Amino acid sequence: MKNNQLTYKSFFIKRLFNKFFNDFVSIDIHKQLIIIRNNIEEISFSIEEISSCLVHKGKIFDSIILQVQDKKYVISGINKVVSKKIKRILYYLQNYKKIKNDFNLFEYITNGNHYVSASENEEVYLKIKNSVINDLSIDFFDDLKEEYIKYSSLFQDYLKTPDKYRENNNNQFIKEELIRYKDFFDTIENQPLTERQRLAVITNEDNNLIVAGAGSGKTSVMVAKVLYLLDKGYIKPEELLVLAYNTKAKQELEQRLSSKIKNLPNVMTFHGLGRSEEHTSELQSPMYL
């Protein structure tokens, strides 16, 4: 067995008499390639070309049945223990991209590079919970074995405490984002934003409730939030709806935003929104501020 290749053969008597039957009696498994052989030919095909791998159980030995596109290949005379292992290996290799995608998704919500909302975390949790890696144990290909141990351990720990992972990620993101956007927060309004105002801007939860009294800088937070979301590329101006309680507040928001960006989002009063019969078609799935 080589580190990058697994070879399995039919039992000796089967291979000895195979000149009379010409069945496939050996299979080489590489990470992306399968090679099967008989006395006459050698056939190779990629892992992705295999649509199914079945084990036909015999009284003493099994047969591996590979469906490759519209053809079926049978490797007969395989030890029963080996047949189960071959099926498991092929299942893992066929699902390798899914497993990598699951891990990339896990890294995306734990690397501290963006704020993870509750709904995002729940979505990732369900995908990790249903990952095919949870149904496997890997003891082949040294590098894949190391990856499996790494992924499986991280996934199991995450599934136990998903909220802890989200909290750690968001704490790291907030700490670093405050540094990255320091100049932005210092200069976006006439006066630098306070720490609480900055936190209100960069906290990108599914729903954000900001409680503040008169003159505490709510409008400044709304202006900064709009510009922050646009700068991050989280949303486009036409997808954003900014609501104000009265016409004066609406005009002030429009004035402050227009002095900083050309393409304004939709700014309306609550009454204006209620009166508008066309807002549903004009504002497709908007984000409300």
Image (spheres, helix red, strand yellow):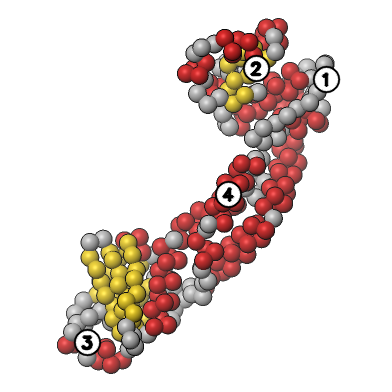
Amino acid at dot 4: Val
Image height check: is 158 above or below 62? Answer: above
Is tag 2's residue or tag 3's residue first in the polypeptide sequence? Answer: 3
Residue under label 2: 243
Image height check: is 161 above or below 17? Answer: above
Looking at the rendered structure, the secondary structure element under dot 1 is loop
Residue under label 3: 18
Is tag 3's residue or tag 4's residue first in the polypeptide sequence? Answer: 3
Residue under label 1: 213
**Residue at screen point 32% across, 83% down:** 58
- Quadrant housing the N terminus: bottom left
Looking at the rendered structure, the secondary structure element under dot 2 is strand
**Residue at screen point 70% across, 35% down:** 203
Residue 78 position, x and y percent, is: 34, 83
Amino acid at dot 3: Asn
Residue under label 4: 124
Looking at the rendered structure, the secondary structure element under dot 4 is helix
Task: Say whether residue 1 is left or right of residue 201.
Answer: left
How far, Cα to Cα, is label 2 from label 3? 79 Å
In the image shown, does 213 or 220 lie closer to the viewer? 213
Q: Which mark identifies residue 176? A: none
Image height check: is 274 above or below 240? Answer: above
Is tag 2's residue or tag 4's residue first in the polypeptide sequence? Answer: 4
Residue 64 position, x and y percent, is: 32, 75
Task: Say whether residue 150 is left or right of residue 91.
Answer: right
Residue 243 position, x and y percent, is: 65, 17
How far, Cα to Cα, is label 3 from label 4? 51 Å
How far, Cα to Cα, is label 2 from label 4? 31 Å
Q: Does any portion of residue 289 appear in the rendered image?
A: yes
